[in-house]
Image (cartoon, rainbow, N blue to C red):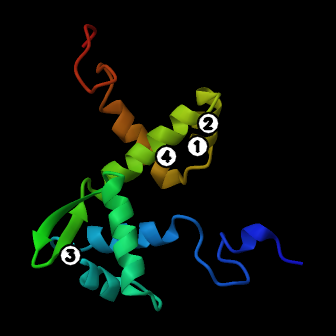
Amino acid sequence: MRHPRDDEAGGASGRRARGELENNVLAALWSADGPLTARQVLERLPGDLAYTTVLTILSRLYDKGMLVRHREGRGYAYEPARDEASHTAQRMRSLLEGGSDREAVLTRFVSELSRRDEQLLHQLLSGYEGRDGAGKLDDKG
């Protein structure tokens, strides 16, 4: 017996997980050297997608403020409003702020980091000692 969520998670029907197509479109744009038209994005995406599907995803991402667009001929060329690192950091911050126990979330996050990522995080944090949350020197340093 199939669960209704199978379709959302790329289950038996072969449908993509929620947000997967948006993520694929963003990845195509982040890897580009400049703005891309919908046709150019389509050519960079895996699978057999309809042109109108790509247009819809680009429009949704634009409406969410995740893309900027420039007039090109009768259509538009799109590029990300933020780089991939900024986008991912914002998503992480949003998830952290949405949790009810910030300390537990951070503790679990750090405990599940690879040794290499843990060392990198420690190195990055030690560079912020003596700074306030905005990265500015506080009164102590």
> What's the distance in space between the residues labelled 4 and 2, CA to CA?
15 Å
Amino acid type at circle 4 is: Glu
Circle nearer the viewer, 1 or 4:
1
Horizontal and vertical percent for residue 90? 39, 44
Residue type (three-letter) at the residue carrying disc 1: Phe
Mark 1 or mark 3, which has the lower sequence index?
A: 3
Query: Nearer the viewer's eye, disc 4 or disc 2?
Result: 2
Q: Residues within 10 Å of mark 4 (few under 14, many from 20)?
A: some
Q: Which residue is mark 3?
A: 36
Mark nearest the camera among 4 and 3 is 3
Along the horizontal axis of the image, is 116 left or right of 59? right
Could you tell whether 79 is left or right of 115 in the image? left
Identify the residue position indicated by label 2 in the image.
Answer: 105
The answer to whether the residues at label 1 and label 2 have Cβ atoms under 8 Å apart is yes
Q: Any mark on residue 118, and which?
A: 4
- The label nearer to you, 3 versus 2, is 3
SS for dot 4: helix
